[in-house]
Image: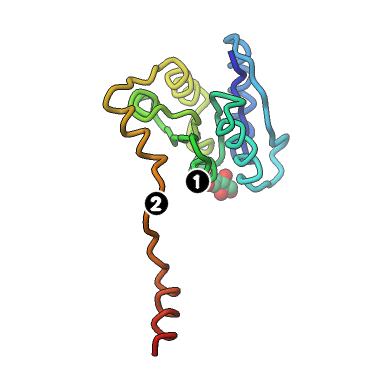
């Protein structure tokens, strides 16, 4: 079994260490990609290396923690084949696996107790992907954008040029 990757910024650090210990007790192999303390850091510095590894298939699952889970998920979801789900309840975690085949779990460290986080993580690890109609939907995520409309200020610049 490939190791579970785990990483956090300062806001998720304390919960990350607790979950890491618990995962090892449960028999999982865990690779911690930082951060190493509660000293202020930037979440992207930790989300990029983890998402890159999942995208490359070096790891099959990753867990990211920051204050809200949002910043981590924004970074991770920029990588091909990475589907990062922010989950704040076991039900969301379950659906993120069943329907979305989430391979990265982004946890809001400032809004979860250790017990809540364990339940979410356990559910996420134990729930299989349902496949079927969801397979088709997952495939469409990777579909290339065909047209990107310019940002409003860029559009304004175009109009000025045309005058
Ligand atoms: C850090 O204060 C906080 O902004 C960060 O952990 C995260 O919540 C960002 O999405």
Mark 1 Cβ and ligand 1 under 8 Å apart: yes
Q: Depth check: 114 or 96 in front?
A: 96
Q: How many marks?
A: 2
Secondary element under disc 1, as helix, strand or loop, is helix
Crowding at dot 2, Cα within 10 Å, few <14 / some 14-19 / many 20+, comes out as: few
Of tags 2 and 1, the one toward the viewer is 2
Q: Position of residue 116 (x, y in %)?
A: 46, 25
- The answer to which quarter of the image holds residue 131 is top left
Rendering colour mode: rainbow
- N-terminal label among 2 and 1: 1
The spot of residue 104 in percent (x, y) is 50, 31
Q: Residue at x 56, y 40 (%)?
A: 66
Residue linked to disc 2:
145
Residue found at the very far left of the displayed protein:
133
Q: Is mark 2 within 8 Å of ligand 1?
A: no
Decide: few, some or many residues near mark 1? Use Cα within 10 Å; few <14, some 14-19, many ≥20: some
SS for dot 2: loop
The image shows residue 3 at horizontal and vertical percentages of 62, 19
Q: Which mark is residue 94?
A: none
Q: Is residue 110 left or right of residue 135?
A: right
- The residue positioned 37% from the left and 54% from the top of the image is 146
Q: Residue at x 40, y 75 (%)?
A: 155
Question: Is residue 103 toward the left or the right of residue 131 in the image?
Answer: right
Badge number at residue 74: 1
Cβ atoms under marks 2 and 1 closer than 8 Å = no
Q: How far across and how far down the image is residue 161, in percent? A: 44, 85
How far apart are labels 2 and 1 at the CA level?
A: 18 Å
């Amino acid at each position: 079994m490939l190791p579970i990757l785990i990483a956090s910024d300062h806001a998720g650090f304390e919960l990350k260490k607790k979950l890491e210990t618990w995962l090892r007790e449960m028999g999982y192999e865990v690779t911690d990609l930082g951060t190493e303390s509660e000293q202020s850091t930037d979440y992207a510095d930790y989300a990029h290396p983890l998402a890159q590894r999942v995208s490359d298939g070096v790891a099959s699952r990753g867990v990211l923690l920051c204050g809200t889970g949002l910043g981590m998920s924004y970074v991770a979801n920029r990588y091909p084949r990475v589907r990062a789900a922010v989950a704040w309840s076991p039900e969301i975690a379950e659906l993120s696996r069943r329907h979305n085949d989430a391979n990265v779990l982004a946890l809001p460290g400032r809004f979860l107790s250790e017990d809540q986080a364990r339940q979410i993580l356990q559910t996420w690890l134990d729930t299989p992907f349902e496949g079927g109609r969801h397979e088709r939907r997952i495939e469409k995520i990777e579909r290339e954008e065909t047209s990107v409309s310019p940002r409003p200020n860029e559009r304004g610049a175009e109009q000025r040029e045309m005058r």
